[in-house]
Amino acid sequence: MSFALDTPLTEALGTSTARSLQRAFGMSTVGQLLGHYPRRYADRGELTPIIQLPIGETVTIVAEVLSSGARPMRNRRGAMTEVTIGDGIGRMSLTFFAKNVGQAEWRAKELAVGRRGIFSGKVSVFNNTLQFAHPDYELFDDTEAAYRQADAHKDVPITIYPATSAVQSWQFAKMVASVLDKLGEVPDPLPDHLREREGLLTARQALEQIHRPRRRGDVDPAVRTLRMHEALVLQTALLQQREQVRSLTATPRRAAEGGVLERFDAALPFTLTPDQQRVGDEIATDLVADRPMNRLIQGEVGSGKTLVALRAMLQVAESGGQAALIAPTEVLAAQHLRSITRMLGPDLSAEVIPTLLTGQMTVPERRRAALRVASGQSLIVIGTHALLSEKTTFADLALVVVDEQHRFGVEQRESLRAKGTAPHAIVLTATPIPRTVAMTVFGDLDTSVIRSMPAGRAGIQTFVAPLAEKPEWFGRVWERAGEEIAQGRQVFAVCAAIDTAKESVESDEAPPPDAEGKGPKWGVVQLAEALATHPTLSKVRSAVLHGKMPSEQKDAVMQAFARGELDLLIATTVIEVGVDVPNASMMVIMDADRFGVSQLHQVRGRVGRGEHAGLCLLVTEAEAGTPARERVEAVAATLDGFELAEVDLDLRGEGDVLGASQAGVKSSLRLLRVVKDAGLIAHARDLAESILVADPSLDEHPGLRGAINRRVSDADRAALGKN
């Protein structure tokens, strides 16, 4: 009997083993098992006498079993097999852990006294004795054969797999070997002529060589082949998703002469920037087409993305169509409502009736808002996840605007779109995305970029306050804040945590505890207490703001700050997006090394939005030369978000590009690295486009179609856009 990639693991390995793999790795098929690639390879090395074994290295020896026994564990459940082996000069111990005494006794019986064999493992020391824990071994009756076999295997790499305490690497390797022995034909994602042109292995060869290489040189061709498969499958899936949206029929939404959009433009007190005009024209063209728009708009903090989106909403409103803007937080949704209402002015607001709909509204308020939306009276609807509720219905949803894409998944975007008939979609992000990431994560969207900033902004200067070398600067930071407030301006102070005593970190991008396991030093609670005794700042009007506060309280604090009734706002990154206070001129970010590059850039953009120049001080205790300090200094060195996005990739490593939420998700990248493999990703996209042009349904490419179905389920397609 042979296995296919779709064969259930229950059939291939038995129910008990399959259940362990499902629990440990979420895998259920042979294909998923074989898609769990080794994370590294260890060399068996030359045959080494026991007395010369180097501690910490993986080695191979030939030895004889001198003693063998099994016993229950003393302090926890399970049992262990303890074996002593020798090579005539030295001796060492082998330790194997088992679930029960029966398993341990089976191992002890197999490793009976007098048996000889090859033993490969990592050398450690326990109770002053050299030890292998769970080594690979192969036993022989013939001593000569043992030495000959050991010589033959010395160049064969040992595969080391990502493992758990329940399924260890050596166990996984045995499962993979068992499946590979019975694996039948593996369909190739690439047709033969493309595979040969690209110089790739067959899919079957690649799986064999990545899991059971006979020598180191087998690994690279296998990885190269499987990396191309991964890039091609993901790029083809994203292009299919884009074409699926494009194949729908949308209602063209034209701007009428003398209509609300023309009147809005005429009333603007400023001229659109060239980028705003260009992106606006791209959107206007998309909206009059008979297929849905699916566009990502990247723009720096304060570049005017909301204005561009509002103009699109007004174009849709010309024909009675509704636009829904979904924001990640109550604070941001309320801020959007105020901002849009202000930009529209009283007359246009009365025509399109901007309406807020959030989960924190009272039942009567929400009922009234929902009625305006369902009846079509409100043509611009702004809300949070409440817009996704089954109870929220629209009369004619024509445009979906998703603000801050990294807070929403594609499935949420699609569930909102499902409330209309093939509505258009705009995704806004203030986090600039390098081209390779955009191609990998947002490949189903057309992309527009707003680089230029509106005129009249004084800009921002950023400096690092390095407390590790200059602790006295801490006092100067707050003196400087007092000077700014004395001139009638306002100051933000941002922390990575609410209360460090309770370890409530509220930063999505905050790196984990540092090398010493320490979390952030300053929380909102701690900073507010410290500044309450400051000679100057204790007398200013201040407040705290964080995500655990009730919605009404958060909104009241933010509005008070916006109206100038507060001088100092001590907050978490809840102020990261959408907060627009032109009089705020200074930003102090505590424990700045606890934030990601893009988040520091995002938070910094809250100041310097008016006539006063912005000042951002990045307070850090990170030592000079450490990665944490480099991250902070990179932000201080430039205001170009696109440059910082590249720096961020370089500093964080491409392994973090898709975010921690992708860990363990089938659609996360396995072998691809978006920085290192940028050229490969672009090439794979070209191949995918040429394949789909000639064969849109992939009828002539069954291997590719099967690979997509196995690798990218509907849920996985959604997960691709969660970042």
Image: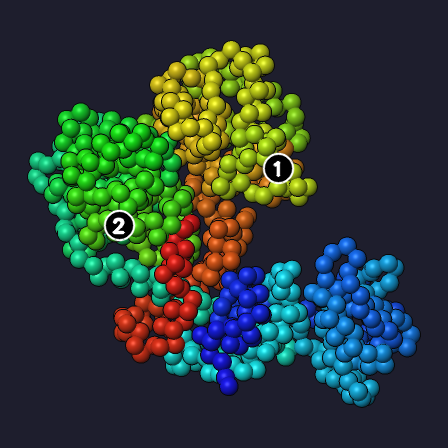
Q: Is residue 632 above or below residue 116?
A: above
| Residue corresponding to mark 1 | 519
Residue type at mark 1?
Answer: Gly
First reached walking from the N terminus: tag 1 or tag 2: 2
* Residue 606 seen: yes
Q: Is residue 700 above or below residue 298?
A: below
Residue 149 shown left or right of residue 421 in the figure: right
Q: Could you classify mark 1 by the number of other residues whose Cα lies within 10 Å: few (under 14), some (14-19), or many (20 or more)?
A: some
Q: Where does the image place residue 546, in percent across and percent down from the top left?
A: 47, 29
Mark 2 residue element: helix
Q: Which mark is residue 633?
A: none
In this image, 159 relative to 716: left or right? right
Quadrant assignment, res 157: bottom right
Task: Quadrant for residue 179, please give it.
Answer: bottom right
Secondary element under disc 1, as helix, strand or loop, is: loop
Q: Quadrant of residue 403?
A: top left
Which residue occupies 25% across, 42% down? 392
Q: Which residue is mark 2?
A: 417
Up/down of 81 relative to 629, above or below: below
Q: Residues within 10 Å of mark 2 (few under 14, many from 20)?
A: many
Camera-side residue: 706 or 601?
Answer: 706
Q: How many marks?
A: 2
Report the amino acid beneath label 2: Arg
Q: Residue at x 83, y 73 (%)?
A: 68
Which one is in front, 102 or 96?
102
